[in-house]
Amino acid sequence: MEEQATTQERFYDGAERRLLFTMPVIAALASLALGFAYGWRVGLGAALGCAVAYANFYWLKRIVAGLADRATQQGQPSGTGIVFKFFIRYALLGVAAYAIFTVSLVSLYGFLGGLFLPVAAILVEAGYEAYAALRGGN
């Protein structure tokens, strides 16, 4: 029983690693598909949106880890630094959206779609975990 719990813990602990691997794959496929279907500007906008979403997800993961360390007093990350990183994510998002909006409204649609990259990756992960559970492996 103890060994099974450890196997399950390792499986679910790997979810973050799988998400970070899945996101670039989905981003490439979605950007190419949108580029072929709606034109290169939408594909490029989607690629930029995916890049911002990936960076946002990664930074959010680091911010949460920093806050957890600060709350448990294991590390002493700067509270100002954590808040700065939190708000710089939104500034980056706003600057990118504004820059794309001024160049091409069509690209903005792709950009906004690309921001849903973490949602798509989480859906893929949920499907994988459901498959693994139904298969009886975990």
Image (cartoon, rainbow, N blue to C red):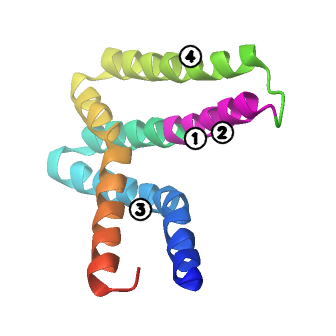
In the rendered image of this protein, does residue 25 appear above or below residue 58?
below
Secondary structure under badge 1?
Answer: helix
Q: Measure the alpha-carbon separation of dots 2 and 3.
A: 25 Å
Find out whether the residues at labels 2 and 1 contact each other: C-beta distance under 8 Å: yes
At label 2, the amino acid type is Ala
Magenta-drawn stretch contains 57: yes
Neighbor class of circle 4 (other Cα within 10 Å; few <14, some 14-19, many 20+) is few
Which of the two marks, 2 or 3, is nearer to us in this view? 2
Which of the two marks, 4 or 2, is nearer to us in this view? 2
Quadrant (top left/top right/bottom left/bottom right) for the C terminus? bottom left
Q: Which residues are magenta?
A: 56-73
Q: Residue furthest front?
A: 1
Q: Is residue 15 left or right of residue 113?
A: right
At label 4, the amino acid type is Phe
Find out whether the residues at labels 3 and 4 contact each other: C-beta distance under 8 Å: no
The residue indicated by pointer 1 is: 61
What residue is drawn where x is 43% and y is 55%? 23
Secondary structure under badge 2?
Answer: helix
